[in-house]
Image (cartoon, rainbow, N blue to C red):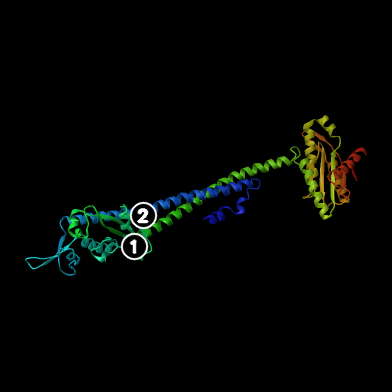
Amino acid sequence: MLKFCYNQFMQPELFKYFKYFKPVKVFLINLSLIILLFITAIYLGIYLRTNNLLLRTARNQAASYFDLIVTTRSWNAHYGGVYVEKKGDVKTNPYLRKIGVEPDVRCEDGRVLTLRNPAAMTGEISDLTNSKSGVKFNITSLKLINPDNAPDRFEEKALLEFEHGKREVWEIDRKAEQPALRYMKPLFIEQPCLRCHASLGYKLGDIRGGISVSIPLRELDQTMKTNKVIILSLSTITLGLLLGTSYLMARQLVRKLDAAQEQLREISITDELTGLRNRRYIVERLKEEIKKTKRSEKPLGVIMIDIDHFKQVNDTHGHAFGDAVLKTIARRIRANLREYDLVGRFGGEEFLVICPEFSFDATIELAERICGIIRIKTITEGTTEVSATVSAGATVLNKEDINIDSLISRADNALYRAKEQGRDRVVAL
């Protein structure tokens, strides 16, 4: 069951929505285990309870058989036994003569009647019920008149327990050829019983033996097997529904949480105004690219770009237009980069471009192209139209750069020189 649940609900592809919420995996697995244990406990309890009730029903049935036999025996003993015609396979009970009772009488019409005492009657009833339903009765004792009624292992154990005060013994016997429920209660000496048993030293109220009832378990076992199949089927269906529902609900929840988490992550690394990556992100990526470049020994170009006279644009046309200028220039820079190049807003009107595997000349060429594109295209917002230019400082990573600061400082110095030399130009160091 555990393997089935794992295979159905715990496959890695089902967790594709848990990119940022890995603890939810643990929660869902723990929830599944709790559900599994809970459902198993419930249905196991139902199964055991049902089987116990079935066994108690069989035990009550055996007790009813016992009471019926005892009542029938009492009726027989009350009349001193019952005479039946001796014919066919009806034979005389020879053990009655041993205790001084003559079993046979001859009628005036010549028929011979023979006495059926309670013990003989019980045996004959047992033969009838055994042939029809497999139910057997046996009257036995530790002091026997008829050796054919000697107790078996269960009966002897029960008789000994009766001597110590126990009044009922039953067990399930599956070692026999036909599994059966064995049930036994004691018989007490009553006045009619003394006719046959006084010679053995019994007195009123003594335990003279007991009657055992044996009920075959074929039908009960079949019922238990059917019950087991039903319980397993219901538990599997219930478990599947609960685990499936839990997974679907968790997946929907986590999809929404992941979407929100992705949005928050995007916000945390994105400049809100320009849509470019922010300074913190672009600096971290530059550190990563420096490590890659040092391992691969391939070039790495860096360009620092600054908008010329941006303060004047803000003062003349307002901050709203200044924001439009920033966004337009950001789009133009990004449009001229390769897919794997990186650009981010480094400061107020400064942008940092990272160009993996770009040589010194290629970096300068890219910076010149960006400056040219921005120069030749005016920026329009509403009725306002201006021409904008940018200055750029270009450099590449060299062996003397021990950290990111020296590389950015060199690009910044190149940008400063471009500003000093009249702006709208590229200076490379």
Tell me the amino acid under the disc marked 2: Leu
Give neighbour class at mark 2: few <14, some 14-19, many 20+ (Cα, 10 Å): some
Residue at 17% from the left image edge and 58% from the top image edge: 195
Q: Where is residue 181 in the image (x, y as percent from the top left)?
A: 34, 58
Q: Is residue 215 visible?
A: no
Along the viewing direction, whichever of 65 and 16 lies nearer the viewer: 65
Q: Where is residue 360 in the image (x, y as percent from the top left)?
A: 88, 50
Q: Mark 1 points at which residue?
A: 153
- From the viewer's perspective, is residue 117 above or below residue 89? above
Q: Mark 2 points at which residue?
A: 55
Residue at 81% from the left image edge and 47% from the top image edge: 354
In which quarter of the view is residue 200 placed?
A: bottom left
Q: Report the mark closest to the observer, 1 or 2.
A: 1
- Left/right placement of residue 169 relative to residue 394 reads left
Tell me the amino acid under the disc marked 1: Arg
Of the two numbered discs 1 and 2 on the same chain, state the one appearing first in sequence.
Answer: 2
Extreme residue in the bottom direction: 88
Extreme residue in the front direction: 201
- From the viewer's perspective, is residue 381 above or below residue 231? above
- Left/right placement of residue 14 relative to residue 135 reads right
Q: Where is residue 300 in the image (x, y as percent from the top left)?
A: 84, 50
- From the viewer's perspective, is residue 84 above or below residue 324? below
- Left/right placement of residue 321 relative to residue 151 reads right
Q: Where is residue 73 in the image (x, y as percent from the top left)?
A: 21, 57
- Find the distance from the CA under tag 1 to the CA under tag 2: 21 Å
